[in-house]
Image (cartoon, rainbow, N blue to C red):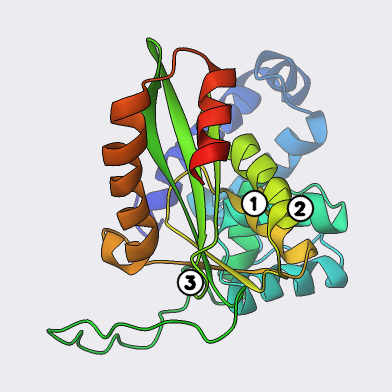
Amino acid sequence: MIGIPCRYLLRVKQRMRVVSYAKENGIRPAARHFALSRQTVRKWLRSYQARGAEGLIPLYAERREARLQPAVIELLRQARIELRMGAGRTRIWLQRIHGIHLPVATSQRTFTKLGVPRLPSRRPRKRRPRQMSLFEKDQPGDSVQVDTKRVRIGRRLAFQFTAIDDCSRYRVLRAYPRLYGGASRRFLHILRQEFPCRIRRIQVDNGTEFPLDFDLDARAAGIEVTRIRPRCPMQDGKVERSHRVDDEESWLRERPQSFPDAGAGLAFWE
């Protein structure tokens, strides 16, 4: 068919079958046979008689009107550009903070309409120096490193959550049977209760045990959450050294057989 775009060829062929059937048997039998309304069959038949096959090309609007409220579109723009969230994290953020239930596909489609189908690129990273500069925070609570490690309690696999202050080296240790977001949120609650000073920043890695819910709980408490670069554990050097000492001095010597024994041992060791 000359003059018909390739993307509409199949649709035009389907409509021509309907038109041919309507010519031979009438509009009502054609509508009944193809499960269409008579108005639709009549419209296609008239378009074909007036313009031929080109009259059967679908006429779709280039852009449909947005059904979202302007306030929701503004929240999506803020999540994409200012908070640098993807569609999945945006859905959780809208549902938890603003009480708006929005599918992931709708968020991504709106991002495309806003001109940001992908996250804006960050500034080019500076070349990392050969020797990493060592530093310490001046005030307790300015930066608290939080990380997890695998341990054995009896014959079961467990996970130790460790928080250590960058300035004072004050530590909080807890053990949990599972490694997931709920455990990290409970540990954050315990950390706020037991830490002797106000925590202003928490530094974590990019593990799945620190999900968006963990970030939102920390922000609600006035705590900033920063993440280290992927595959750079040296940026959590203090908590990594703490884990090594725990292995050498506590877990390899005590070998607790139950969670109460492990909790008591961690309370004594921290």
Q: Earlier in the sequence, mark 3 or mark 1?
A: 3
Type of residue at label 3? Asp
Q: Position of residue 185 (x, y in %)?
A: 67, 44
Residue labelled with disc 2 = 193
Q: Residue at x 66, y 17 (%)?
A: 25
| 235 lies above or below 207 | below
Type of residue at label 2? Gln
Q: Earlier in the sequence, mark 1 or mark 2?
A: 2
Type of residue at label 1? Phe
Q: Nearer the viewer, mark 1 or mark 2?
A: 2
Marks 1,2: beta carbons within 8 A: no
Packing grade of label 3 (10 A; few <14, some 14-19, many >=20) is many
Q: In the displayed structure, does residue 130 sit left or right of residue 253?
A: left
Packing grade of label 2 (10 A; few <14, some 14-19, many >=20) is few
- Location of residue 125 (image quadrant): bottom left
Residue labelled with disc 1 = 214
Q: Nearer the viewer, residue 213 or 16?
A: 213
Question: Count the marks: how many?
Answer: 3
Q: Nearer the viewer, mark 3 or mark 1?
A: 3
- Location of residue 268 (image quadrant): top right
- Residue that lies at the very extreme toward the left in this rendered image: 130
Q: Position of residue 7 (x, y in %)?
A: 41, 50
Residue labelled with disc 3 = 166
- Location of residue 198 (image quadrant): bottom right
Q: Earlier in the sequence, mark 2 or mark 3?
A: 3
The label number, if any, that marks residue 25 in the structure image: none
Q: Residue at x 59, y 83 (%)?
A: 139
Mark 2 secondary-structure assignment: helix
Marks 3,1: beta carbons within 8 A: no
Q: CA distance from mark 3 to mark 1?
A: 20 Å
Packing grade of label 1 (10 A; few <14, some 14-19, many >=20) is many
